[in-house]
Every structure is written in C-alpha cells, then in structure tokens.
Image (cartoon, rainbow, N blue to C red):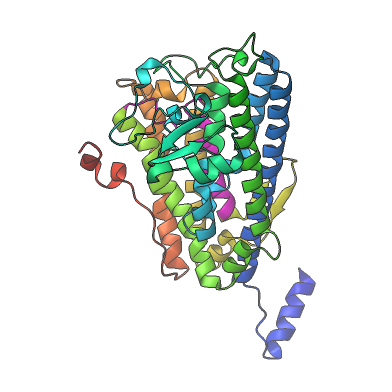
Amino acid sequence: MKNAFLTSTALLIAGVVPAFAVEKTDVLDTYADIAAAKYQDSLTAAQKLQEAVIALVADPSAEALNAAKAAWLQARVPYQQTEVYRFGNAIVDEWEGRVNAWPLDEGLIDYVDASYGGPSDENAAAALNVIANPTFTLSGKEIDATEITPSLLEDTLQEADGIEANVATGYHAIEFLLWGQDLNGHGTGAGNRPWTDYASAELCTNGNCDRRAEYLTAATDLLVADLNWMSAEWANGGKARAELMADTDAGLTAMLTGMGSLSYGEVAGERMRLGVMLNDPEEEHSCFADNTHNDHYYDGLGVRNVYHGAYIRTDGTLVSGPSLSDLVVESDPALDAEMKAKLDATMISLGRIKTAAEAGFAYDQMLERGNEGGEMLIMGGVDAFIDQTRSIERVVTALDLDGVAIEGSDSLDDPNAVFQ
C-alpha cells in the first residue's frame, strides 16, 4: 500500500493523473471470455450426451437410456447459463432457436397419446409423426424422409410452414425422444418412455425403433455441430467477439439488454408468470423431463455471472475479470451494492424452487390451480426477477447508456391480453 501511495503521489506532483478506472474494453473482454468458456462447456457436455446416445442406439437397455437422460440433464447446466447472451447479441438470437426452441408440438416428431389430438388450424403438421412416415407431404411438397439426417431436421422440419411450434431440433426435441410425453398432468412423475422404444425388432415397442434411433442420433449430432459453431464465434478471432468489441458502449448495451430481457420478459414473464396464469403443466421449459426448476435457476445464475464478471466452469476452474460491477462501483457504490443484493435475492428465490422440486414437489405440480404453496414459490422467483430488472435499469442510467431495450411480456405488462 505504501509503494502504491508514493507512486500515485509522485504522478500527481508530475501532473499525471493515474488511471485507476476499469476500462470498458476490459469488461467486454471478460464478458466474451466467459461466453467462450460457457459455450465450450456446453459443447463438451453435448459431446458426452452424444456418446451416451451412441451407446443407447448400439445396445439399448434401461441403463443406457438412463445414462443418456443423465447426460442430457448435465448438458443443460452450462447451456442455460449462456441464455443471458441472447437479446443483446444478434448472432446468438438468430441461432438460439436451433438449439433451445420451445414449446414444441411433439407429434411432429413421434407417436403421442390419443389425448394429444391431431392436426389443427394453427398447425397442420402437429401430428405428422416423421418417425413413422418415411414419406409425407409438407407445405404442399412430397418429402422423402427415408433417411433421417441432420439436414432433414434442420432444413425441412425445423419451423416447417413458418410455425414456431414445429420444433424438430435442439435440446427439447432430444428431451422428448429420451423421456417421451409427460402424461401425469399436475401429478407426480415425468415422461416415461420405455427403453424398448429403441430395441431391436423383436422387442421394439411403439414401432419404428430404428428410425427413432436415427432421429435421436441426427438431433444430437446437429446439437453438437451447432454448439461447436457458436463456441468458435466467441473464441479469439470469432465474429461474435469481434462485433462485441467494435463499439464499447454498444457492447455494454448488449450486456445489459441481455441481463434485463432474460430477467424480465423471458423468464419472469414467458416462462414463469404465464404458467401461473394458465395453470398449465405444459408451460414448463423442460416439460418432458421435469427439469424446469434447473432451467430457471441456471438462467438466473447466468445473469449474475455477467454482472460479477465470473463463471465457474464445469471442471471447477474460474473464469473472471473486470466486470460491470467494477464500472458501477466507481460511480455509485450504493447502486452496486443494491444490484448485488438483488441478484443474490433472485438466486435465493430460485434456490427455493430448485430445492422443493428436488424434494419431490415438481414444477408442474406447483402450477396446479389452487396450489398456494406452488404459486408462492414461483411468484417469489417472478417478483425477484422483476425487482432485479428495476436495478438493472438504474445501472443503465448510471453508466449513461442509450439503446437498452428490455423485452416485455403480456403476462407482466398486459395480463388481459393473455386470455384474448
């Protein structure tokens, strides 16, 4: 401390003002470094899922299916923490639907329960069942699907007819293929697809086990390819990193846009408040696996990571550096303390949901009409996300940034519109 003081004093005497302030470019570097680490962790976890799927397809068994499910659950942990890079980074927004689109009309992909229904005016392909049909008509064209490939999924089926519910790729398509439909409503239990859905001919259940294996393999291969692409975009020399660093204020705007929009419109609104309003067990982000409590928790953690400029990788190592917190504390220490407290409060609320779900009170049970305990848990998370968004808005003002447009949600901004 003595040497630092003497050095500072000497500089002042010489008429030089020491630059103690955190540089904005350093904050952006940290943000990009953490993005690269998160997408690399997501890729590594997806590759482990891919290995588990290969093992399941090669030698189907209950144990192999459970191993693939466990790998899917692990793969969600780093990926959900990347969602805070949406909204502010166009390159992520334009890509995200390939890997994490939801909800999906699962009848597009495979067999469904009779209660699911058939084609609707909103979606003629809602019960297409590609796995059972090697040829079919889509958008007025005859489609040859005798071989199920990543290209078929990506170029032909994903958002077919321009309908967002036609989700053919990504985590949730894979989730459905591993768990099957959750037919328990607000009751106990997730999807319960039998391992024999991937068995050889004499043991095969529900038909087309070979094509189901082809679809699962293609979807997993495509997920790995997509994550590999995004990981490279954030590495040194990648386009996403270059676009971020091109304009420091625009980069900071992207950071805060992502934090605010994920907190408010996306998670608090579309993923949490809407489900409480509709009391619909299908309004879960991971409705087949009953993993929604973790989805919300790691989304919240991703927001906190950005503000603190710190991320713990799946191997336990820490990626950290100059942060938004460092910028804010220089101009308004009280606001920095407030922002940190709000982020911590959100994680406590999300932790309560996570703990309750892991103890057997599943998220779809929390959504049941009249379940006061469940509504209290979910709304605790909603209110915390809203509250931290108000502080994010104050951070925007403190940093004198323009162009931060936080996404809204009818469930929060115009609840009556939800029921129209």
Q: Which residue is drawn at 54% across and 44% down?
A: 154
- Of the 4 image quadrants, the one containing the N terminus is bottom right
Residue at image x 39%, y 42%? 139
Q: In the rendered view, tell whether residue 375 sits above or below residue 387.
A: above
Q: Is residue 112 above or below residue 23?
A: above
Q: Left or right: where does residue 96 sit relative to residue 162? A: right
**Residue 132: percent from left, percent from top:** 51, 23
The residue at the point 49 percent across, 31 percent down is: 135
Q: Quadrant of residue 119?
A: top left
The one of 28 and 387 positioned closer to us in this rendering: 28
What's the residue at 65%, 46% (across, down)? Answer: 225
134 within the magenta span:
no
For the C terminus, the quadrant is top left
Residue 282: percent from left, percent from top:
39, 27
Q: Nearer the viewer, residue 144 or 337?
A: 144
Task: In the rendered view, tell whether residue 232 sits above or below residue 186.
Answer: below
Q: Where is residue 99 in the image (x, y as percent from the top left)?
A: 55, 43
* Residue 294 placement, left or right of 376: right
Front residue (pair 186, 60)? 60
> Is residue 56 visible in this depiction of the protein?
yes
Residue placed most toward the observer, 157 or 416: 157
State whether residue 351 appears in this view: no
Q: Residue furthest right?
A: 3
Quadrant of the image occupied by residue 30: bottom right
Q: Give the residues in magenta.
A: 279-306
Q: Where is residue 306 in the image (x, y as percent from the top left)?
A: 57, 54
Is 291 one of the magenta-colored residues?
A: yes
Residue found at the very far bottom of the displayed protein = 14
The image shows a total of numbered marks equal to 0
91 shown above or below 100: below
